[in-house]
Image (cartoon, coloured by chain):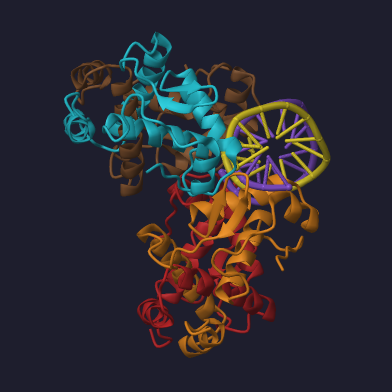
Chain colours: A cyan, B brown, C orange, D red, E purple, F yellow
Amino acid sequence: MITINIRDKRPIYEQIMDSIKEQIIHGLLKPNDKMPSIRQLASTLEITPNTVSKAYTELEREGVLITVRGKGNFISDTPIGDKGEKKMEELTKVLQKLCIEWQYTGQTKETLIEMIDKLYVEEEN
Amino acid sequence: MITINIRDKRPIYEQIMDSIKEQIIHGLLKPNDKMPSIRQLASTLEITPNTVSKAYTELEREGVLITVRGKGNFISDTPIGDKGEKKMEELTKVLQKLCIEWQYTGQTKETLIEMIDKLYVEEEN
Amino acid sequence: MITINIRDKRPIYEQIMDSIKEQIIHGLLKPNDKMPSIRQLASTLEITPNTVSKAYTELEREGVLITVRGKGNFISDTPIGDKGEKKMEELTKVLQKLCIEWQYTGQTKETLIEMIDKLYVEEEN
Amino acid sequence: MITINIRDKRPIYEQIMDSIKEQIIHGLLKPNDKMPSIRQLASTLEITPNTVSKAYTELEREGVLITVRGKGNFISDTPIGDKGEKKMEELTKVLQKLCIEWQYTGQTKETLIEMIDKLYVEEEN
DNA sequence: GTGGTCTAGACCACG
DNA sequence: GTGGTCTAGACCACG
């Protein structure tokens, strides 16, 4: 189930993207799975098709989805990984900021790693 | 040195906040240090005083700066920590999203922790 | 009706905040009610959108309003209460000062309590 | 002891005024008591004489202090009370706002009155 | 249409 | 000199 929350500060299209990625990581969506159509998902989430479209387009650009003309949108079957150095740089910046904020909350590196242990889904899953 | 980057997607006031926090974590700014005045920093960064003011106000709300009327802004001397549960929840969400994105780039939990080891500033620093 | 008064010593954004809270307490604004848009209220009050924005932003931070991107601002439907200990400390200080001033005007504790009886809106309203 | 706190959001002159009024209410300063000179208090509090002067002037206007040319400043011996309707109106507004904020924190009228019982210094003191 | 950010100022209280 | 508030705009992302 793809979910959004209007109170969330993230834009809706970003929430959809994040939600889909979570499902993939957790194995609830698998390579070549067919995604709901733009109109269908828009209707389910009670939002405008434009927003779903933006999320799908963005995910295609990231290589997460494949759009097949007249067929619909599918989960990409290209192996996870090698999604570009830019993405890595971006994530490193997010990580750096997170580390700073984390320390600022008075938490230690150890509690951060513990948290990651809980959150990180092993590849074998 | 507080720096901003026009290409950065983060709003300027947020870049200023992050920059100051980094300086504090790395010991370049110490408790009770006087910050440049709003106008001074605005002039240095070639932005409007309003934007600096927003950053400073936000930092004061977070307990990072102390604003003294007619005197200026100072680095808070309250021990880092106890910044509230809300902040922790917020950070956990960011961390969760980061973990997902990280896996999506094909990286392992181990490389994430290695990266943290590099980034996280030990308490003794 | 949200009203401001130029002669009032409180800043305009604070008058707006107080005015909205009053309306809520008196039941004239209810949970999930849509607030006028920033531009709309600014135009009605003949002030700049920035000032209304400041009031709304502050109210959202206090949990009084919910800001929904592209939709507008709404009265929060989270139950009143649990607004944090900090707020309570703040109010206690205001109360302490009020008590002192009250005594200074030659009034007794009893007249203060009478006044509160008049002002305090019972839960059933 | 008259005290000020630079972190306090109230202007210093106002803190001085409040502090003196507290002392009077609690009987630590009595009618006709001589106040420290402007320079003396300024030096004790490590602030500029201008600020103390403003506090004293304002207190004189309120009838709390009496300035005697060449002699200094004294606590007024006019009975507490009858300090004007304007003051009462002002206090009522503060009280109204306090009531609203109080309710907003989820507190009841009863806890407000309890708090007043603790804070209000009986006239006989 | 909606809020968020920013510009380039102004005036004010406080110290 | 300092921060706080406000004006009267502008441009942007999002929906």
Residue C35 picture quarter: bottom right
Residue D22 picture quarter: bottom left
Q: Is residue B91 above or below residue D106?
A: above
Q: Is residue A110 above or below residue C100?
A: above
| Residue at the image position 49 percent from the left and 35 percent from the top | B73
Report x, y in % for residue A118: 18, 36
Is residue D49 or residue D102 the one in the foreground? D102
In the rendered image, is residue B66 in sight?
A: no
Q: How many marks?
A: 0
Report x, y in % for residue D104: 47, 69
Report x, y in % for residue F5: 66, 49
Residue B11 picture quarter: top right
Left of D44 or right of it: where is B27?
A: left
Left of C86 or right of it: where is B36?
A: right
Name the image quarter holding the N terminus of chain A: top left
Report x, y in % for residue D96: 57, 75
| Residue at the image position 46 percent from the left and 71 percent from the top | D102
Q: Is residue A90 above or below residue A98?
A: above
Is residue C44 or residue B13 the one in the foreground? C44
Name the image quarter holding the C terminus of chain A: top left
Is residue C124 or residue A86 the one in the foreground? A86
| Residue at the image position 20 percent from the left and 32 percent from the top | A108
Is residue B43 or residue A125 the one in the foreground? A125
| Residue at the image position 33 percent from the left and 34 percent from the top | A22
